[in-house]
Image: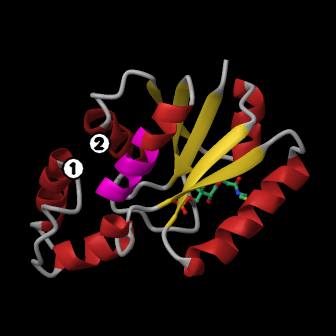
């Protein structure tokens, strides 16, 4: 069975993430979306919250499974027998970082390849960090994130 792995911090998930996962789900029999603990980043939402937000945003996609993970991505891929990572590319600026990760993952696990989906132009400017920054200062992000993420952002940031 062809299974794709869509890993990310997803802090929080955006419409751009949802678009990439929906498109991966059209090309693979199933997609494992892995919400990854990233100790280097100070997350606004817990792993459980991010996973729940993505689960709600992807409820309409039958062949998607949500999981959360802390550790090396290659270990998750190996444990699940997955050989394809699918990630989104927004701009050339993403490319260097993504290329390096793809090559490192392939060096660690030679059976593991990375494929890229180009972001829709309408979401190319979108990032989780910008969404958080705009929302924190009261800007409108309702067209940029799924409804459940909007609710969670309003709730989390209202005390700040
Ligand atoms: O959405 P992001 O934050 O760009 O996703 C990056 C992520 C989570 C996919 C990457 O940091 C990752 O794979 N982390 C797990 C730890 C790991 O395997 N690090 C080596 C990557 S080459």
Q: Residue at x 16, y 55 (%)?
A: 150
Helix, strand or loop for disc 2: helix
User: Which image quarter is the N terminus in?
Assistant: top right
Q: 31 and 51: which one is in front?
A: 31
Q: Quadrant of ligand 1?
A: bottom right
Residue 19 position within the rendered picture, expressed as x and y whole percent measured from the top left? 37, 49
Q: Is residue 16 left or right of residue 9?
A: left
Q: Residue furthest top?
A: 1
Q: Quadrant of residue 23?
A: top left
Q: Residue at x 39, y 62 (%)?
A: 120
Question: Which segment is the magenta one?
Answer: 15-22
Whether residue 15 appears in this view of the structure is yes
Q: 22 and 55: which one is in front?
A: 22
User: How many other residues sit within 10 Å of disc 2, few (<14), some (14-19) or many (≥20)?
Assistant: many
Please say if 29 is above or below 8. above
Q: What residue is disc 2 on?
A: 53
Q: Is residue 144 left or right of residue 82?
A: left
- Give the mark nearest the N terminus, 1 or 2: 2
Q: 150 and 62: which one is in front?
A: 62
Q: Residue at x 76, y 68 (%)?
A: 100
Please say if 102 is above or below 148. below
Q: What residue is disc 1 on?
A: 146
Q: Is mark 2 within 8 Å of ligand 1?
A: no
Helix, strand or loop for disc 1: loop
Q: Main secondary structure of the magenta part?
A: helix
Q: Is residue 8 left or right of residue 111?
A: left
Single out the mark in the foreground, 1 or 2. Answer: 1
């Amino acid at each position: 069975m062809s299974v794709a792995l869509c890993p990310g911090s997803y802090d929080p998930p955006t419409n751009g993430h949802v678009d990439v996962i929906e498109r991966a789900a059209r090309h693979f029999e199933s997609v494992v979306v892995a919400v990854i603990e990233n100790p280097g980043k100070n997350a606004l939402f817990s792993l459980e919250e991010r996973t729940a937000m993505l689960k709600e945003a992807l409820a309409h996609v039958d062949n998607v499974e949500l999981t959360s993970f802390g550790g090396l991505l290659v270990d998750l891929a190996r444990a699940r027998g997955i050989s394809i990572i699918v990630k989104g590319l927004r701009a050339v600026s993403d490319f260097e970082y993504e290329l390096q990760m793809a090559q490192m993952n392939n060096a660690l696990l030679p059976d593991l390849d990375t494929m890229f989906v180009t972001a829709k132009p309408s979401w190319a400017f979108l990032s989780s960090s910008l969404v958080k920054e705009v929302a924190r200062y009261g800007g409108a992000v309702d067209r940029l994130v799924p409804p459940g993420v909007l609710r969670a952002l309003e709730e989390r940031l209202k005390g700040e």
